[in-house]
Amino acid sequence: MNKISKVLALFAIFAVVAVSAGEYPDDEGVLVLGDKNLAEALGEFEHVLVEFYAPWCGHCKKLAPEYVKAAAALKAENSAVKLAKVDCTVEKDSATKYGISGYPTLKFFIKGEPVAYEGGRTEPEIVNWLRKKTQPSTSEVATSEDLANAIKRNEVLVVFFGGKDDASFQAFESASKKYEDVGFVYTTNADLRTEQSAPEGTNIVLLKKFDEGRHELAGSFTGESLTTFIDTHKSPLLIPFDQKAAQKIFGDGIATIFLVHQKNEAGEKATSVLREVAQKLKGKIQAAISDIKDGGLGPRLAEYIGVKEADTPAFRIVVPSKGGAVKKYVPEGEATVESLTQFYEDYASGKVSPFYKSEEVPASNDAPVKIVVGKNFKDIVLDSTKDVLIEFYAPWCGHCKKLEPIWNELATELSSIQNLVIAKMDSTANEVDGVEVSGFPTIKYYPSNNKSKPVTYDGDRTKEGFMKWLSTRLTVEHDTAAFQKAQEL
């Protein structure tokens, strides 16, 4: 090949690269994909994490800088994993294809096949989750620099002083596969044991960037005992309640004792009490603190678990589940280390009943739309002589506000039908055992003959839509003429 031919060949190669790169524009290291190129990218790259988002979504805006940092971290370690994003407000075919109903939704694609993303939404959590899915769950460190880099990368790092031939390695590797927020490294370099001040017979050291900083596990261990050791020490004694903590606690269903406080003398005293309680109950229950005036998640958490500003400092045991149900337990009397510790023991042994929020029962309830609160839910909604159509709403919900005049009109026109109740309940201020509401407004129909199995309304949110839907479901004797007259109005 002559010199000119070689130059032309090089230009051809560069042209192909340019075209290939041009097919996938990126925004700060994150591929920008959509209806025209998503399928192609998923076919080209073996591992792709895709964020399906909406530009107006607050959670998406919070995720954006973490997502960019995660892309940079993966690139720095020469990872083949790609991070991408799809604007669902524009790329609607892609959103429909993958059933996107909320934002942000993250899906991890392996050779084009999606799997649910179950990691966190911070840079370390994203990177660690992807490492676990695409790389061995453990790695060897041979030098001080290797170990220093591993410590730098991980909020929590478990170091095993042994090699793959060690009898305990299998237990170490087995435990490593259970965690996405913990790093696992091993070494046979005796100098690193000395450097970490790990005595002979202690083969596990857990290093963390908070509280005591490190813990040692002496003697031999099994996968189960190592897991127990890690679970006991991997989280801060008191977790400040932020977006990361919220996802961890409520996303993973972690039972937590919360302190909702203000930054004052009473709040500081209560924090000291909780710290001591958390130390006593370490490994049994997580502890978290939240400032009701932090301008972030604090006020929302307080509302959610039934704490008002006048109640602070207030303690609650909160038990979420991945299915969405959340149980809350409220201690009574003065909160001391002894009383809170005993309260936990009573909760753990099933001696404490869950707490459900409720407003006071209205002094009068004569309007066409009946007001339901936690305390009168049974009397109104579960009345076996009446069919009940109830709206579960939130005062701040725009869709609820739009529905309000329609709901009032519906109730007014059906008010002559004595055995039919149109009602509403503010679900931010009231809770009922067994009633789960995941979005607003949620409308449920409780027929008189089957109160244990309410039907979720899925028709048009118009007066006519409600009328038509109700006309086929009424179960008790009603004034048919009155109903037909209302439909005609």
Image (tube, rainbow, N blue to C red):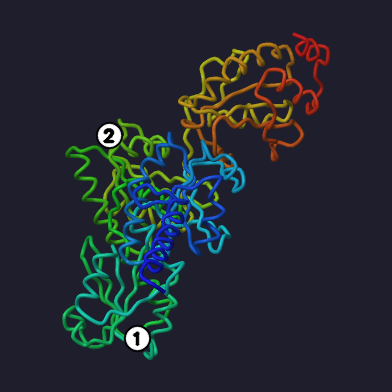
Q: Is 100 drawn above or below residue 162 in the view shown? A: above
Q: Is 488 drawn above or below residue 54 in the view shown? A: above
How much space separates mark 2 and mark 1, taking CA atoms? 48 Å
In x, y percent, where is residue 407?
62, 18
Residue hosting label 2: 293
Dividing the image into 4 quarters, which one contains the C terminus? top right
Q: Is 296 drawn above or below residue 369 in the view shown? A: below
**Counting other residues with Cα less than 10 Å from the Cα at mark 2, is it few (<14), some (14-19), or many (20 or more)?**
some
- Determine if residue 347 is in view: no
Q: Secondary structure at mark 1?
A: loop
Left or right: residue 20 versus residue 3 is right
User: Which residue lies at the image location 45% right of the left edge and 26% below the top edge?
Assistant: 396
In x, y percent, where is residue 484?
81, 13
**Counting other residues with Cα less than 10 Å from the Cα at mark 1, is it few (<14), some (14-19), or many (20 or more)?**
few
Query: Of residues 373 and 74, which is closer to you in this image?
Result: 74
- Amino acid under disc 1: Ser
Disc 2 and disc 1 in contact, CB within 8 angstroms: no
Which numbered marker is on residue 220?
1
